[in-house]
Image (spheres, rainbow, N blue to C red):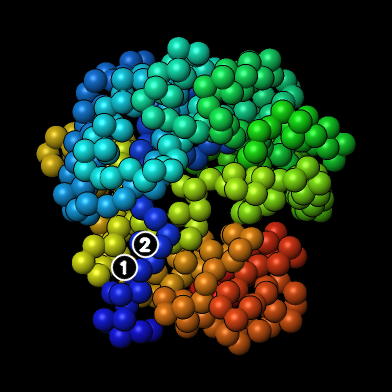
Amino acid sequence: MPSANLWRDALAELWQERGFGLYVHWPFCAAKCPYCDFNSHVRAAVDQAVWAEALAQEIRRTGQLTGPRVLTSIFFGGGTPSLMEPSTVDTVLSAARDVWHFANDIEVTLEANPTSVEAHRFEGYAKHGVNRVSLGVQALNPDDLRNLGRLHSVPEAQSAFKIAREFFDRVSFDLIYARQNQTLKDWEQELSSALDMAVDHLSLYQLTIEEGTAFWDRAQRGMLRGLPTDDLGADLYDLTQKLCEDAGYIAYEVSNHARPGAESKHNLLYWRGGDYAGIGPGAHGRLTIEGHRTATECWKQPEAWLKATSNGTGIREEYSLTPQDVADERLIMGLRLLEGLVVDDLTSDIDWDRFKNLKSDGFVWQTDDRIGATSTGRPVLNYIIAQLAKS
């Protein structure tokens, strides 16, 4: 690892080169999906004015810590951020403008569920500064939508997409594949339809059964039948890559596909090791301040977070990352990218003997200043990371 002075200089250079973002977590949903392990909660009523002010207060508090910076991206995630009133979004964005300078080409993304898409609300988001929307479509098959616990229909998803296109040039949407009883032919037809509908970006995730979800409980009781075998899952992944590539959508990240130039700036900021402030229940952040890279984690329960903000801060835990922590995080995140990651003072002590073995097996590649996972290695990325990460 580099000396303390070199370390501080390298950290400062990293976030300034890779950007500074703001993540805002809206924790409320109309219903909890059985596959979802995100921090989302169902509430009969939400006082939006109270929540808007609490989020704005946390942004102002964070701005005092960071000082003036250029903000390159903002992401409203959840939960279901499209349940936010446009006035709530406006309050949050106004607070961010008060403490940071917006880049001329700032990307402001809001996640939306098709059931909560209304033209007047989207028009309001656009008016207040949102310029990119990501729709949680998840499936274009009615039976699978029901199995996934989604509240919208296929026509509603298509209608939501059309409404979003009226107000936003950049519209992405998510699909989940490797679903119950899904065949290669089923997915080929569905993904082809999605690519015909898409603008310039798609997020395509294999269904994973996460502990703590309703699907996990069903699986433990032997009630989640029809999940693909490992071989079928691999075939579905390969088919996904081929169809997207043929349509001009490059897999710039393991699960994200875009036409050149349409990549998500905010997600690239994460994967490239930039700084980001995490605001809202359960939000995580990474901030470089006075030569230290600090990890932050907010209270998860909405009511606990709201109470904590009234007492000074919604952050439940914060700690300085060690040089090894930073190196491993950059490795874990950077290997997800098609471009790989730069090998520099922050990542130079990779286990090079193991790397050489992985390279000889065709799992990783190397140039003068970069390393990355090959097309063979990307499906087994967890294995590669376990071999190379030290902490």
Instruction: Look at the numbered discs 2 and 1 and tell me whether their residues touch, using CB distance below 8 Å.
Output: yes
In the picture, measured across the screen, residue 109 lies left or right of residue 55, that is right
> Identity of the amino acid at label 1?
Ala
Quadrant containing the C terminus in the rendered view: bottom left
In the picture, measured across the screen, residue 116 lies left or right of residue 337, that is left
Q: Is residue 104 visible?
A: yes
Q: Is residue 300 visible?
A: no
Q: Position of residue 139 (x, y in %)?
A: 69, 29
Q: Which residue is mark 1?
A: 12
In the picture, measured across the screen, residue 122 lies left or right of residue 172, that is left
Q: Position of residue 41 (x, y in %)?
A: 40, 29
Up/down of 215 relative to 32, above or below: below
Q: Which structural element holds mark 2?
A: helix
Q: Which residue is mark 2?
A: 15
Q: Which structural element holds mark 1?
A: helix
Quadrant housing residue 25: top left
Q: Which numbered tag is attached to residue 137?
A: none
Quadrant housing residue 191: top right
Residue sitting at x 35%, y 61%: 16
> Identity of the amino acid at label 2?
Trp
Marks 2 and 1 sit apart, C-alpha to C-alpha, by 6 Å
